[in-house]
Image (tube, grey):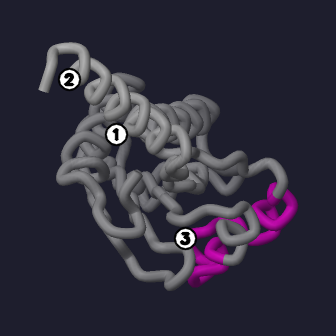
Amino acid sequence: MTELSRIGALMLLTVGLVSAALVAPAQAATRVAVFDFELLDTSGEFDPRGPKPEEMRRLAQISADVRARLTAAGYQVVDLAPQQAALTEAAPLRNCNGCELPIARALGADIEVIGLVQKVSNLILNINFQVRDVATGAVLRAGSADIRNNTDESWARGISYLVRNRLLDPPMTGKAAP
């Protein structure tokens, strides 16, 4: 085989591989509905008006953090806004016995993440999450982290630990994989 024919064969092989890559369908990212984390206050500081403003802000922050980390890991986080009325009616999700699954299905999600912060006292809290397959309702993964102190830093460290060590490690497989 001459040098010219080797170059020609290599060019044809390269063109064929590039063409195949362009024609092959791209694997769609797994669509995930991350519901806002909720607060369950079992401390003696319970206020019937609801969580304190700083706790509401922290709930929003950890919910946003989970969404951002999942997006960075290759998941497609779906917008919850189209189902806001259903979410408001179902709240709190921790008490609705799976009523969030039809909401996640309506949003086109493959998996869902629901989360809860339990406030035992102003010193002891725990952050919990659960990942479910939207089609079957099967729990794919769950995790919990105890934190100390009701501060921005403790909440941020708790959710960071959970995402790194329970939600994404080991990588989700099967239907939940990106």
- Look at label 2 and name its amino acid: Arg
Q: Residue 34, percent across and down?
A: 56, 52
CA–CA distance in space, label 3 to label 1: 18 Å
Residue at x-position 72% and y-position 51%: 80
Does the magenta segment cover residue 85?
Answer: yes
CA–CA distance in space, label 3 to label 2: 65 Å
Q: Quadrant of the N terminus?
A: top left
Q: Residue 129, percent across and down?
A: 39, 58
Label 3 SS: helix
Q: Give the residues in magenta.
A: 83-101
Q: Which residue is mark 3?
A: 94
Residue at x-position 81% and y-position 59%: 83
Q: Which mark is residue 159?
A: 1
Label 1 SS: helix
For this orientation, the residue located farthest to the top is 3
**Of callouts 3 and 1, which one flags the residue occurring earlier in the amino acid sequence?**
3
Is 60 left or right of 130, judged from the image as shown? right
